Amino acid sequence: MTAQQTARFTMYSTGWCGFCARLRSQLDREGITYDDIDIERQPEAAEIVMSANNGNRTVPTLVYLDGTSQTNPSLAQVKEKLITLSA
């Protein structure tokens, strides 16, 4: 995947979340593009996170264009999902 490709998922995060910062750094290093929404700056986005996580505000939560989601995934899990979306 190259940086010129459009984002195929949105990462819902917070500014203080260490897991979010780690995943963000890994994605950036790999050149994987994504939209990042801070649920504390956009409270309406917290509803999306809660609906994906049985009412919990767990971040990072990734929501893909196909409507599926992953909570606190590893870089390998994200890459695997992107390959599946490309097929």
Image (cartoon, rainbow, N blue to C red):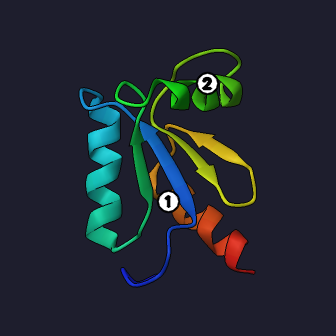
Q: Does residue 79 appear to the left or right of 36 in the view shown? A: right
Q: Does residue 8 appear to the left or right of 14 in the view shown? A: right
Three-letter code, disc 1: Ala
Query: In the rendered image of this protein, does residue 51 appear above or below residue 75?
Result: above
Q: Are marks 1 and 2 in contact (CB under 8 Å)?
A: no
Q: Which image quarter is the C terminus in?
A: bottom right
Query: In the rendered image of this protein, does residue 48 appear above or below residue 22?
Result: above
Q: Residue at x 24, y 26 (%)?
A: 16
Q: What percent of the width, then of the height, locates residue 61?
A: 53, 38
Asked whether 20 or 5 is in front, the reply is 5
Mark number, residue 61: none
Circle 1 or circle 2, nearest the eye: 2
What is the spatial separation of the Cα atoms under label 1 and label 2, in whole angstroms?
27 Å
Three-letter code, disc 2: Glu
**Location of mark 1 (residue):** 76
**Location of mark 2 (residue):** 47
Q: Residue at x 36, y 80 (%)?
A: 3
Q: Does residue 20 appear to the left or right of 83 in the view shown? A: left
> Which secondary structure, mark 1?
helix
Asked whether 52 or 6 is in front, the reply is 6
Tell which circle, 1 or 2, labels the residue nearer the N-terminal end.
2
